[in-house]
């Protein structure tokens, strides 16, 4: 019960971004650019980046080193943790 309350509190305070048509358009631009430079990465990382770019984020915080490649083709900063 305590854990459920914590999760509910977290979700009330969080903003959840969705994979919509704008995000998929951005993701396809990112993947296309990555393919053109010969550096494709995991499709899920590209989708996450597309969601972030479409929603005006300036930064992605991630632990996947492949994601740093996104900085080369998209107007977004990637911070590694």
Image (cartoon, helix red, strand yellow):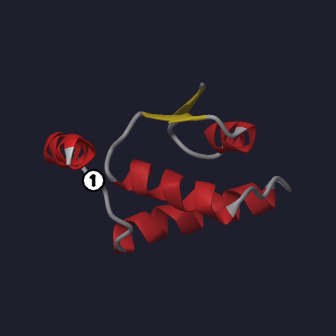
Residue closest to the eye, 24 or 32 = 24
- Left or right: where does residue 4 sit relative to residue 12? right
Residue at position x 33%, y 44% in the image: 56
**Quarter placement of the C terminus:** top right
Disc 1 on helix, strand or loop? Answer: loop
Residue at position x 36%, y 67% in the image: 22
Residue 64 on image: x %, y %: 68, 40
- Left or right: where does residue 74 sit relative to residue 43? left
Q: Badge 1: few (under 14), some or many (20 or more) residues near its Cα, within 10 Å? A: few
Q: In the displayed image of the protein, which residue is found farthest to the front?
A: 1
Judge whether 51 appears above or below 1 on screen: below
Q: In the displayed image of the protein, which residue is found farthest to the right?
A: 38
Q: Quadrant of residue 19?
A: bottom left
Q: In the displayed image of the protein, which residue is found farthest to the bottom?
A: 21
Q: Quadrant of residue 29?
A: bottom right
Residue at position x 23%, y 47% in the image: 15
Judge whether 67 appears above or below 25 on screen: above
- Left or right: where does residue 77 sit relative to residue 43? left
Count of numbered badges drawn on the protein: 1
Residue 74 on image: x %, y %: 56, 45
**Tag 1 residue:** 16
Q: Quadrant of residue 44?
A: bottom right
Residue 32 on image: x %, y %: 68, 65
């Amino acid at each position: 019960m305590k854990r459920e309350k914590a999760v509910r509190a977290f979700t009330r305070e969080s903003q959840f971004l969705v994979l919509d048509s704008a995000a998929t358009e951005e993701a396809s631009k990112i993947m296309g650019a990555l393919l053109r430079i010969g550096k494709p990465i995991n499709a899920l990382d590209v989708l996450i980046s597309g969601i972030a770019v479409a929603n005006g984020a300036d930064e992605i915080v991630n632990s996947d080193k492949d994601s740093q490649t996104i900085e080369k083709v998209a107007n977004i900063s990637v911070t590694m943790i």
